[in-house]
Image: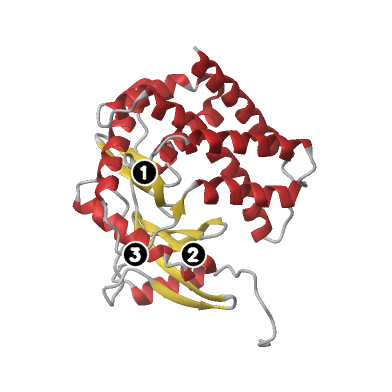
């Protein structure tokens, strides 16, 4: 291979990854490895002879350089020690939690996580939403007490909102009506959130991608998975993420999930009227960040983001949310 060649990103063949896992982990009967998702980080499902072993994540070059895997492992081990059920990293033969892989584009970290089992149950949405809320509250109580040794990603408005807006503008054009609308909304959200000092309460390590698919329910056990986007910031951002992802999946029926979820959360952590208003605005922040994330993920694969439906869905959500928030604030 010519040393002059540069690689944006390589994807390891599942058979090769299976060999790496067999050589570096004390595991028996690794029967198969399947690529599940390729994005910034690549995720593979690792199966044994009779059951799932776990999920292998190969972190992006940027995530590896910022030691994301190390911080994530530190946080997960802390949560586990404080009785929060999480999908833990599995130790390698040498006792560490990550394997550094030398790939064409540079070194990238490999971490293998335990499987978290989820059982389907025919229960009312309000029932499991309430219990989800309780467990997210417990997660946040633990997160507020965590004192990291490693430096986490800062989930502030510069990172979540304005950096996202800059990339969106580069993609769709800063003179377009869509960007002008997003820019006005971003200024409004920043001004309102900036008026409230959120650093003195409900500040800690956010999950960063908290939605129902990242909380596995097995009977009375609830296990949190996929902390790859975790970082330090207002925990209200996690709640905003749940609110926005619930709306995207449930539409006008979102309150059938959100209200019982919030009631469960409030059993653990009390929120005042201003904080509840902040959650609504963080839902907008999440949607702007997610739009940026989707654009970046598409570019990462060498393609041009052209999902007009996703763009319009984001705009529609933000317009509806802004109208609802304004109505609540004036009532």
Q: Residues within 10 Å of mark 3 (few under 14, many from 20)?
A: few
Q: Quadrant of residue 278?
A: top left
Q: Quadrant of residue 211?
A: top left
Residue 63 is tagged as: 2
Residue 150 is tagged as: 3
Residue that protrudes farthest toward the right in the picture = 175
Query: From the viewer's perspective, is residue 252 above or below residue 226?
Result: above
Front residue of this view, candidates 60 and 161: 161
Q: Is residue 98 visible?
A: yes
Q: Residues within 10 Å of mark 1 (few under 14, many from 20)?
A: few
Q: Is residue 31 visible?
A: no
The total of numbered circles placed on residues is 3
**Which residue in the structure is indicated by mark 1?**
199
Residue mark closest to the camera, 2 vs 3: 3
Q: Residues within 10 Å of mark 2 (few under 14, many from 20)?
A: some
Q: CA distance from mark 2 to mark 3?
A: 14 Å
């Amino acid at each position: 291979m010519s040393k002059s060649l540069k690689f944006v990103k390589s994807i390891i063949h599942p058979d090769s990854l299976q060999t790496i896992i067999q050589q570096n982990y004390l595991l028996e009967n690794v029967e198969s490895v399947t690529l599940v998702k390729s994005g910034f980080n690549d995720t593979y499902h690792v199966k044994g002879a009779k059951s799932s072993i776990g999920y292998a994540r190969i972190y992006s070059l940027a995530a590896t350089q910022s030691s994301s895997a190390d911080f994530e492992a530190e946080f997960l081990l802390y949560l586990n020690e404080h009785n929060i059920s999480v999908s833990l990293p599995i130790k390698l033969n040498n006792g560490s939690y990550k394997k550094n892989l030398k790939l064409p584009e540079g070194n990238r970290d490999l971490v293998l996580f335990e499987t978290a089992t989820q059982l389907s149950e025919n229960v009312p949405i309000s029932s499991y939403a309430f219990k989800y809320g309780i467990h997210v509250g417990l997660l946040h109580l633990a997160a507020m007490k965590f004192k990291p040794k490693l430096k986490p990603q800062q989930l502030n408005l510069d990172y979540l909102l304005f950096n996202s807006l800059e990339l969106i503008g580069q993609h769709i054009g800063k003179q377009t009506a869509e960007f002008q609308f997003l820019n006005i909304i971003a200024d409004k959200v920043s001004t309102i959130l900036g008026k409230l000092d959120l650093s003195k309460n409900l500040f800690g390590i956010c999950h960063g991608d908290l939605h129902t698919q990242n909380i596995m329910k097995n009977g009375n056990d609830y296990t949190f998975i996929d902390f790859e986007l975790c970082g330090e910031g207002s925990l209200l951002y996690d709640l905003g993420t749940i609110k926005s992802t619930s709306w995207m999946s449930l539409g006008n029926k979102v309150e059938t999930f959100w209200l019982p979820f919030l009631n469960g959360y409030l059993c653990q952590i009390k929120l005042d009227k201003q904080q509840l208003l902040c959650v609504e605005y963080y839902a907008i922040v999440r949607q702007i960040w997610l739009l940026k994330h989707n654009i970046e993920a598409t570019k990462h694969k060498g393609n041009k983001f052209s999902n007009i439906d996703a763009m319009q869905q984001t705009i529609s959500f933000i317009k509806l949310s802004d109208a609802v928030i304004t109505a609540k604030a004036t009532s």
